[in-house]
Image (cartoon, rainbow, N blue to C red):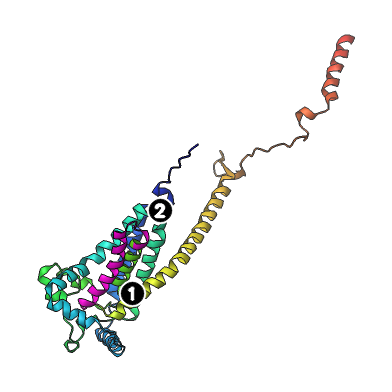
Amino acid sequence: MTITATAPRAAAYRGKLRWWTELPLIAVVYALYSGARLLVRGDVDDAVGHGADILHFEQLTHLDPERWFNQLFTEHAFLGVPADFAYASLHYIVTPSILVWLWLRRPTHYRTARTWLLISTLIGLVGFTLMPTAPPRLLPGAHGFMDTMAQYGSYGWWGTDASAPRGLGHLTNQYAAMPSLHVGWSLWCGIMLFRYGRNWFVRTLGVLYPLTTALVVMGTANHYLMDAAAGVATMGVGFLLAKPALRTVDRVQGRVHGALAARRGQAGAETVVASSVPGVTPVKVPSPRTVSVPPGAPGDADRDPDASGGSGAGRGERSRMS
């Protein structure tokens, strides 16, 4: 005999997660990230000093490829223009698309992946707060970097303020280079594609996307190599914290639900009796309960048979006597 099992629907794997609760959660975290990112711009001189220190450290260790990439993108528009488009758009398109894909096609992994991304984003915000850093394009001209976003601005919608559209530069923080969440988010996307993709093409994209993003952020002079490395480290810490955070949330939810259930049970065990007398407060009395009688317990059927029989016999004798 052949038994055919029907696979559970995707909704069964998501438990109590619903899209109308997920969207506000992600929107609130991103709004918090964006708003706080603007509020912690820091001092410009400190940000420029931090950027110069990072570049000096990279030069000492011979790990400063960003100048070479920037020169390449500056001299060749066929590299610089696509790189600017990628920097200004993919960050905001690919990441949400991967989240939707996980929700629809990989629901068993969605919650952990989403938590990993959100925690890493908040950690990045801590980095922006503690160490405002000017990107290479905002360092003094002696350092030799060219702002490709400004150079090729006529090709796209962005202005001279990073990837912000023209006229909206005041809505972005240009001194939030450390860590690079462009690289961090692209790494998260790449891991999701490589791990949960079911064909070689999707997995190849998962490898190429974070590598390409790292080249783009350095070639456009928006980040240092150390920024990219810090973005990778940020995602690593977020990954380590994701599952403990979920266990904590589940534990708290379990206790809250248990307390609410106990409260409802206690309320259901009492009945409010309204008083018909004006001015008298209604009282609570225990609700009636059905009590099971164990076998052999004395009841109506177990009373002394002589009691009823005797009474009947007495009535018969009295009848004959009369």
Residue at screen point 84% across, 15% down: 315
Residue 230 location (% of width, % of height): 34, 77
Query: What amino acid type should be assigned to the residue bearing mark 2?
Result: Leu
Q: Residue at x 35, y 74 (%)?
A: 232
Q: Residue lying farthest right? A: 321
1 or 2: tag closer to the N-terminus: 2
Q: Which residues are magenta?
A: 194-222
Separation (CA) of disc 1 from disc 2: 29 Å
x and y, in percent, of residue 124 in the image? 34, 73
Q: Is residue 121 left or right of residue 304?
A: left
Q: Is residue 36 left or right of residue 245?
A: left
> Circle 1 is placed at which residue position?
231
Q: Image height check: is 99 above or below 143? A: above
Does the magenta-highlighted stretch encompass residue 319? no
Q: Is residue 201 above or below residue 289?
A: below
- Furthest-front residue in this view: 1
Occupied quadrant, residue 67: bottom left
In this orientation, does residue 322 appear?
Answer: no
Dot 2 corresponds to which residue?
A: 17
Secondary structure at numbered mark 1: helix
